[in-house]
Image (cartoon, rainbow, N blue to C red):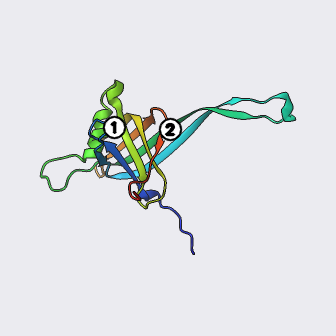
Amino acid sequence: MALRSLLAKDWVLEVNTSGTAETPVWTPVKGLTSMEFSLDAETEDDSDFDSNGWGSEVVTQRTWSLEIEGRRKRQTDSASFVADPGQEFLRQAGLVVGLTANVDVRWYRKDGAPDAFRGTAAVQYGGGGGEVTDLEPFEVELTGQGEPEQIENPVAA
């Protein structure tokens, strides 16, 4: 059996546009060109005299974030601009402060691999403009609020 690499393009990001965690309405964020899930750790030195001179660190806190980039898209069956619903939901959340700037998101691999997560995140949205020949970009940093939940991959479910 030959082994094959996983492709970075096989990730899906969806936002819950219903406003409730109990009955989510998952809306895909289209037009992504880059997505990076990061886990960071805070550590503390827990070395002692019994370690024979070797240091030791223990993880005391973890944080997560998703950084995404893409191209602003519009629905092609409309004569006027109608934004991609997933992109627009993130853009709107990035314009407010407080708890309304938090979104319920899930991200998973569309090839069915077991990598699948759900979490609440604050939205930092940026984009717009560019050169005359550019496609309009957007970028979003989703900063995790608490622990991300590992979920069953919706493709495999």
Count of numbered tags: 2
Q: Position of residue 23 (x, y in %)?
A: 29, 41
Q: Nearer the viewer, residue 112 or 80?
A: 112
Picture quarter containing residue 153? bottom left
Query: Dots 1 and 2: beta carbons under 8 Å?
Result: no
Which is closer to the viewer, label 1 or label 2?
1
Q: Identify the amino acid type marked 1.
A: Ala
**Pick the front one: 97 or 23:** 23
Please tell me whether mark 2 sits on a helix, a strand or a loop: strand
The outermost residue toward the top is 98
Which residue sits at x=39%, y=58%?
A: 155
Q: Is residue 87 above or below residue 20?
A: below
- Closer-to-camera residue (143/110): 110
Q: Give the secondary structure at mark 1.
A: loop
| Residue in view at x 35 percent, y 36 percent | 103
If the image is split into quadrants, where does the N terminus sit? bottom right
Within-10-Å neighbours for mark 1: few <14, some 14–19, many 20+: few
Question: In the image, which disc is placed on residue 69?
Answer: none
> In the image, residue 98 lies at what x, y percent?
35, 24
Furthest residue toward bottom: 1
In this image, 150 relative to 90: left or right?
right
Q: Residues within 10 Å of mark 2 (few under 14, many from 20)?
A: some
Going 36% across and 32% down the picture, which residue do you hit?
A: 102
Q: Amino acid at mark 2?
A: Trp
* Residue at which label 1 appears: 21
* Residue labelled with disc 2: 64
* Relative vertical location of residue 3 with respect to residue 106 in this rendering, above or below: below
Residue at x 41% of width, y 48% of height: 107
Indicate the position of residue 115 as horizontal and vertical percent values: 48, 53
* Left or right for 3, reference 54: left
Q: Is residue 29 left or right of residue 147?
A: left
Looking at the image, tell me whether mark 1 or mark 2 is earlier in sequence order.
1
